[in-house]
Image: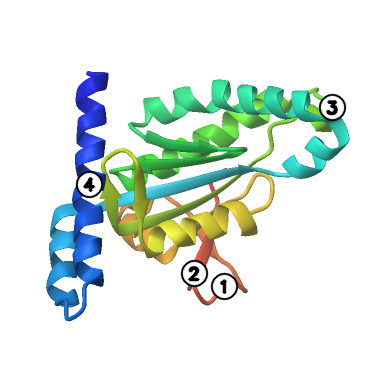
Amino acid sequence: MKYQRSIAVGASEDRLSRLIAERMAPGADKTRIDERIWDLFGEEWAIVFTDLAGFSRNVEAFGIIHFLQTIFESERLLVPVIDDNDGILLKIEGDSMLIIFRNPNKALRAVAGMQAVCSEYNVGRPEEEMVLLCAGIGYGRVLRIGDADVFGKEVNSASKLGEDTAKAGEVLVTQGVVDAVATGGKYSFSELDDTSVAVGKAYRFNYR
């Protein structure tokens, strides 16, 4: 199974690199090549970026062992919630996770659950040992390259919201998320007053 997975990811990356090389050639028909890339790799996903608030400050104050402990604890707490809601954990980089969900409702449910397990874990702990989660969610058509990576506006927006904008305990989402789940009426969102031009309209998910 692991061998098959490595072939699938490698084949996708190889195909994309060849198309990009073709696109860079003089006189290339970029519009046609772009259509081929989107036909091959374009899919709709909910993209979740998580981050740990105050992480860099705690590393500076308490050292690398504290850093490793916090990473270990966050993974132990959060990965089961991701699995239970059919998410795919694509990457862990430092204190950040990149997770994708086919269903935006499950993405919201998962992140609300992740915040809940963090809140429960933090009860009675000193601040430096708390797992304080921030999250950003986008939804829309992206380029998914096997299980290696995803690219697109919603990916960039989710990253910006989760890693740069959200505060501890906050879940911020794009317009794409709100549009995708609005018909259900199960969720409450509050529009943010000031967000990046690149992100466009963004909202706070009132998961509590």
Kind of residue at disc 3: Pro
Above/below status of 52 relative to 196? above
- Residue that extends furthest to the bottom in the rendered view of this protein: 27
Q: Residue at x 83, y 39 (%)?
A: 60
Kind of residue at disc 4: Asp
Q: What residue sits right under mark 2 in the picture?
A: 199
Calculate the distance from the C-alpha at mark 3 to the C-alpha at mark 1.
34 Å
Q: Position of residue 162 (x, y in %)?
A: 56, 52
Q: Is residue 142 left or right of residue 172?
A: left
Q: Are marks 1 and 4 in contact (CB under 8 Å)?
A: no
Which callout, 1 or 4, points to the residue nearer the camera? Answer: 4
Label at residue 47: none
Above/below status of 13 relative to 23? above
Quarter of the image that includes the N terminus: top left
- Quick check: can you spot residue 64? yes
Calculate the distance from the C-alpha at mark 4 to the C-alpha at mark 3.
48 Å
Q: Callout 2 environment at 10 Å: few (<14), some (14 to 19), or many (20+)? A: some
Q: Residue at x 25, y 54 (%)?
A: 17
Q: Callout 3 environment at 10 Å: few (<14), some (14 to 19), or many (20+)? A: few
Q: What residue sits right under mark 1 in the picture?
A: 196
Q: Is residue 109 left or right of residue 118?
A: left
Label at residue 126: 3
The numbered mark, 4 or 3, whose residue comes first in the sequence reads 4
Calculate the distance from the C-alpha at mark 2 to the C-alpha at mark 4.
30 Å
Q: Are marks 1 and 2 in contact (CB under 8 Å)?
A: yes
Which callout, 4 or 3, points to the residue nearer the camera? Answer: 4
